């Protein structure tokens, strides 16, 4: 959907909100959580998918049930001598494990078994919608099948979900806390993401409030509750590495700084010049993660 069509849709939802805030909130949330088709959307993505086929063929893929369908978890054996570690990798919104093969291969070469999770509505997983509760449920299903994990590595939305899964409050969910956590170009709070979405769509304040109420209805908590930075501050025993580029145009560098404010257990490393997507499979990222896991 182009920027112009987003604005048209946003104005239509604003008009709906004048008549029914609840209906406007539902429509806005459905639009926000829609993943569309998992098929590649550009020539670059089609090329990446073709390049990853050989590596993906090396994986054992297991379909895991969640209440909204099935998610695909891909198990990659170590390259070389196994060291007994098992790592979980979670991709970002609009991505898939196929696109993270540079990173996964680098981790496998350290002797680790790597599990790559396709989130709902992405890659080999079913569905056309993705929400925080669905993503956390997918991580939980993967943990029960392959965990516990020595480390969880997440990019973008996948990093946000990894942090929430690791540090979420016990009275809301069962935390799945790994030995270490790595967040690559990840947002820190849902309210920042919703604010960016509302601004892009041109939503009125009325629709913004309706969207927050819809989140509360579905997840049982307001948007402000979903702050991974605040939750990590309550888990000082969990070593965290945050990798971010100050030139990231999709997730502000402010998110990385807020993560770092969670405490001394969070280490922030800047990988400037790598943007939001090139950072995933870069040698600099693989090197930083390898050093962190070995330290």
Image (spheres, grey):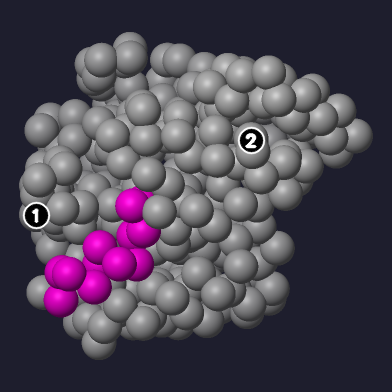
How many residues crowd around disc 1 within 10 Å: few (fewer than 14), some, or many (20 or more)? few
Image quarter of residue 51: top right
Q: Nearer the viewer, mark 2 or mark 1?
A: 2
The residue sitting at 49% across, 59% down in the picture is 187
Whether residue 72 is situated above or below residue 151 in the rendered picture: above
Image quarter of residue 16: top right
Q: Secondary structure at mark 1?
A: loop
User: In this orientation, does residue 268 appear?
Assistant: yes
Q: Position of residue 109 (x, y in %)?
A: 32, 58
Magenta span includes 83: no
Which comes sooner in the sequence, label 2 or label 1? 1
Q: Is residue 284 left or right of residue 113?
A: right
Q: Which residue is mark 2?
A: 207
Question: Quarter of the image containing the N terminus?
Answer: top right
User: In this orientation, does residue 278 appear?
Assistant: no
Q: Is residue 5 left or right of residue 147?
A: right
Query: Residue 275 versus residue 294: which sits nearer the camera?
Result: 275
Outermost front residue: 19
Q: Is residue 49 left or right of residue 214?
A: right
Q: Which residue is mark 1?
A: 84
Outermost bottom residue: 264
Could you say which disc has been placed on residue 7 in the image? none
Image quarter of residue 19: top right
How many residues crowd around disc 2 within 10 Å: few (fewer than 14), some, or many (20 or more)? many
**Which span is picked out in magenta?**
225-236
Q: Position of residue 223 (x, y in %)?
A: 42, 47
């Amino acid at each position: 959907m182009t920027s112009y069509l987003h604005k048209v849709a946003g104005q239509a939802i604003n008009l709906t909100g004048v008549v029914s805030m609840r209906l406007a909130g539902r429509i806005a949330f459905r639009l926000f959580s829609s993943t569309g088709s998992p098929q590649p959307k550009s020539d670059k993505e089609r090329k990446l998918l073709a390049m990853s086929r050989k590596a993906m063929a090396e994986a054992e893929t297991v379909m895991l049930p969640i209440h909204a369908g099935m998610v695909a978890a891909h198990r990659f054996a170590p390259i070389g001598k196994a060291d007994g570690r098992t790592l979980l990798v979670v991709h970002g919104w609009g991505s898939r494990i196929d696109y993270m093969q540079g990173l996964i291969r680098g981790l496998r070469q350290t002797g680790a078994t790597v599990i790559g999770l396709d989130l709902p509505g992405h890659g080999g997983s079913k569905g056309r919608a993705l929400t925080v509760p669905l993503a956390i449920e997918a991580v939980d299903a993967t943990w029960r099948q392959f965990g516990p994990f020595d480390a969880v590595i997440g990019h973008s939305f996948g990093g946000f979900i990894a942090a929430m899964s690791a540090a979420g409050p016990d009275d809301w969910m069962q935390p799945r806390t790994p030995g270490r956590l790595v967040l690559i170009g990840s947002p820190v709070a849902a309210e920042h993401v919703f604010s960016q979405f509302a601004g892009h769509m041109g939503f009125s304040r009325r629709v913004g409030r309706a969207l927050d109420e819809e989140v509360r209805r579905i997840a049982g908590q307001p948007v402000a509750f979903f702050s991974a930075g605040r939750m990590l501050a309550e888990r000082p025993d969990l070593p965290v590495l945050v990798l971010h580029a100050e030139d990231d145009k999709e997730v502000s560098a402010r998110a990385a700084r807020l993560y770092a404010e969670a405490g001394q257990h969070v280490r922030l490393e800047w990988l400037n010049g790598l943007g939001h997507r090139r950072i995933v499979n870069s040698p600099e990222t693989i090197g930083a993660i390898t050093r962190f896991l070995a330290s």
